[in-house]
């Protein structure tokens, strides 16, 4: 699904990504862990087209995507969330979901205005899809609330919903549970797993909690100073000396 080959990204003298290679198979959940500043978000930014790479290759569904714009990459079915969840605050939860879907349809606003007959079935489908997702996310009772009135954790659930409205093949999640209380964290994880299994998505997830990683990931890559220092199952990773040394600092 995703293949990253010898990726390098520098910020001035700092090598944020140093020859990073990794693969994510279809229909799997892969974790990306590492200490603060090890390059995890930078990898997401380069893969999703927000930053330009200095060297290396990125393939999505077998097709080269490095050099494409973030929008072009999202349209190919590779979507991401940001470390800080953002959603238009003056729109309701349901409106937020529908707005996310509209981007996917790719209609320009004028076409939408003048082609009512063509748009309506799409809108109806989008509303049905939004309701289905909001039920899974347990946000259905809040569908008419303003997004700005949601708690931090609920905003993260909403941003997950918005991503799924775009019907991607793969999603990149940057610390989806950061700042979320433990109960909602477990709900988020359950929802990610449920949606992934039901709809056969691939997920690459940055996460600091080993508990979350263990409960959700098939495989984990560990970054340290911009380099992949280990890969394996969550169990293997937790017993890897290099990882303990770098990540947990207790070898
Ligand atoms: N836009 C930027 N300009 C300059 N330096 C940057 C930029 N983005 C990231 N960096 C630097 O690159 C390194 C990797 O940062 P990155 O945000 O990828 O780390 P991270 O693994 O996501 O960390 P965290 O766990 O704290 O989110 C850090 O040293 C950071 O200061
Ligand atoms: Mg980060």
Image (tube, grey):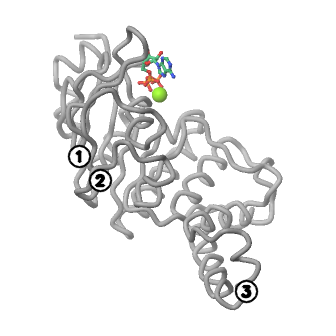
Q: Give the spatial CA distance, label 2 vs label 3.
A: 34 Å
Pinpoint residue 152: horizontal percent, then vertical percent.
67, 41
Image position of 206 (left or right of 106) = left
Mark 3: which secondary structure? Answer: helix
Q: Are marks 3 and 1 in contact (CB under 8 Å)?
A: no
Q: Quadrant of the N terminus?
A: bottom left
Could you tell me which residue is drawn at 27 percent across and 50 percent down? 64
Q: Give the spatial CA distance, label 2 vs label 1.
A: 6 Å
Numbered badge on residue 116? 3
Which residue is labeled 2 in the image?
60
Q: Are marks 2 and 1 in contact (CB under 8 Å)?
A: yes
Q: Nearer the viewer, mark 3 or mark 1?
A: 3
36 is higher (above) or lower (below) than 86: above
Pinpoint residue 128: horizontal percent, then vertical percent.
61, 80
Disc 3: residue Cβ within 8 A of ligand 2's nearest atom: no
Task: Please rate how many residues cluster around mark 2, counting C-alpha atoms within 10 Å: few if below 14, some from 14 to 19, many from 20.
Answer: many
Tell me which label, 2 or 3, sits earlier in the chain: 2
41 is higher (above) or lower (below) than 23: above
Which residue is labeled 1 in the image?
3
212 is higher (above) or lower (below) than 187: above
Tell me which label, 3 or 1, sits earlier in the chain: 1
Could you tell me which residue is drawn at 34 percent across and 15 percent down? 15
């Amino acid at each position: 699904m995703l293949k990253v080959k010898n990726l390098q990204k520098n910020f001035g003298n700092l090598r944020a990504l140093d020859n990073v290679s990794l693969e994510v198979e279809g229909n799997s959940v892969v974790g990306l862990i590492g200490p603060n500043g090890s390059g995890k978000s930078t990898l997401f930014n380069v893969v999703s087209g927000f930053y330009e790479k200095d060297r290396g290759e990125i393939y999505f569904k077998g097709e080269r995507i490095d050099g494409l714009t973030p929008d072009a990459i999202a349209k190919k079915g590779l979507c991401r969330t940001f470390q800080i969840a953002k959603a238009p605050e003056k729109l309701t939860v349901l409106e937020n979901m529908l707005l996310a879907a509209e981007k996917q349809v790719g209609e320009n606003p004028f076409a939408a205005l003048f082609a009512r007959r063509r748009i309506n079935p799409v809108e109806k489908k989008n509303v049905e899809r939004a309701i289905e997702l909001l039920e899974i996310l347990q946000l259905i009772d809040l569908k008419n609330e303003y997004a700005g009135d949601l708690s931090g954790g609920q905003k993260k659930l909403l941003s997950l919903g918005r991503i799924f409205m775009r019907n991607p093949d793969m999603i990149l999640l940057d610390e989806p549970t950061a700042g979320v209380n433990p109960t909602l964290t477990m709900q988020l994880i359950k929802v990610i797993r449920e949606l992934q299994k039901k709809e056969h998505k691939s997920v690459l997830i940055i996460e600091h909690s080993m508990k979350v990683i263990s409960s959700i990931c098939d495989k984990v890559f560990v970054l340290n100073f911009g380099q992949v220092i280990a890969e394996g199952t969550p169990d293997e990773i937790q017993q890897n000396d290099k990882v303990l040394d770098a990540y947990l600092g207790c070898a």
